[in-house]
Amino acid sequence: MRLTETQQAIRDTVAAFSRDRIAPNAIQWEADGRYPVELFTELAQLGLMGMTAPEAFGGTEADYVSYALALMEIAAGDGGLSTVISVHNAPAIACLLQSGSQAQKERFLPDMCAGRSIGAFALTETDAGSDASAIRTRAERSGSGYVLNGTKQFITSGRIGGVAIVFAVTNVEAGKRGLSAFVVPTDTAGFEVDKVEHKLGQRASDTCALRFVDMAVGEDQLLGREGDGYKIALANLETGRIGIAAQSVGMARSKRRSCMRGNDVPSARRSSSIRPSAFVWRILPRGSRRPKPWCWRPPHARMRASAAFPKRRWPSSLHPRRPRRSVPGHSRRWAAMDISRSSALRKSTGMCVCARFTRERPIFCGW
């Protein structure tokens, strides 16, 4: 696939911003558990807070290839920030573009594209994940609007968000066709952040449990028609998966570059709980403080263990006891096993696992 000049320009611009502005501050933001407000203004100036939105509402009106390329570069600098941007663009903005009325678009999209209001997607519940038909949050008719009661779980940007797309059941007897979607400002009375989840990673991107207590919304906040919620949820979850895939590629590329650099990784990052080498065991000769990454050797350049790894140079932590007897024919020899049987993946990544075979058990040295 060949990129257009516009797509290449977007990729290069976002990559430079991610390298110079995002990556150097990612550890501090992770420790603080939040992102500075001015960061979203800077992202909006690059057009990243409304990439697929029309220019009339302040968006970039880019295609989804450009959107995926931009997310990949953001994710390479900070995975949590890419999660916030991904949910904000799709499904949050995507829901308004697809199902919102003209009045709803004019009310919410300008602030969202300018980075003044972050979007959230309130679908998941304790007993309802991607199965939108299992939602228990209720929206009951009250005069010219609705009153919402219920809870949501694992909602990205639930704390910092300014607008949330909320799904609730308006007709219990209709099943899937009784689900509706509402666009709700988070400062609405009855909108409560019940809990901010403690996570192992991406702590700067808040993931929250929400509670709606007699939250009144107007009829003009209904997305589409009453009963369209299930259709809206499924359509925009599909769009959101583009962003998730782009994030995964960006973070994987960043991890691979970090592993290949080895000692070029800053010491602060090496000593933190999020280490670039967390998934790679590196061989440490006794007394050595500067290990060399070895598992990224491409298949055609693999060296025999006798030349690459000197005898009796393994720390006791990797194999505390010496095996009694090696398998005949494999004594003092190392076998390389590919992580995948796919030759295409093997050629593109060059990843391999080395193990010393003994009668007791194989001792794995890296992956």
Image: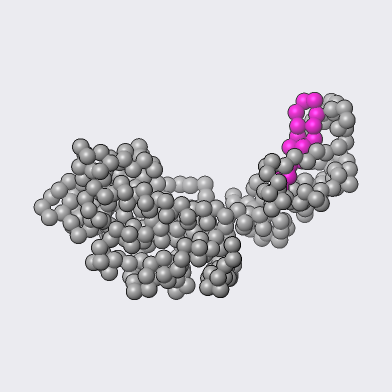
The answer to which image quadrant residue 47 occupies is bottom left
Position of residue 28 relative to residue 10, above or below, is above
Residue 156 is situated, as x and y percent measured from the top left of the image, at 41, 53
Q: In this view, does 233 lie to the left or right of 344?
A: left
Residue 92 visible in the current orientation: yes
**Segment tinted magenta in the rendering:** 351-367
> Looking at the image, which residue is at 75% across and 32% down?
362
> Looking at the image, which residue is at 20% across and 37% down?
173
Q: Is residue 150 magenta?
A: no
Query: Which sits in the foreground, 97 or 167?
Result: 97
Q: Which residue lies furthest to the left in this view?
A: 143
Residue 50 is situated, as x and y percent measured from the top left of the image, at 40, 67
> Looking at the image, which residue is at 33% across and 45% down?
152
Q: Which residue lies furthest to the front in this view?
A: 1
> Looking at the image, which residue is at 86% across and 44% down?
304
Q: In which quarter of the image is the C terminus?
A: top right
Residue 208 visible in the current orientation: no
Q: Quadrant of the N terminus?
A: bottom right
Q: Does the magenta stretch include residue 356?
A: yes
Query: Which sits in the foreground, 234 or 203?
Result: 234
Q: Is residue 39 left or right of residue 147?
A: right
Q: Is residue 73 left or right of residue 196?
A: right
Query: Which sits in the foreground, 116 or 197?
Result: 116
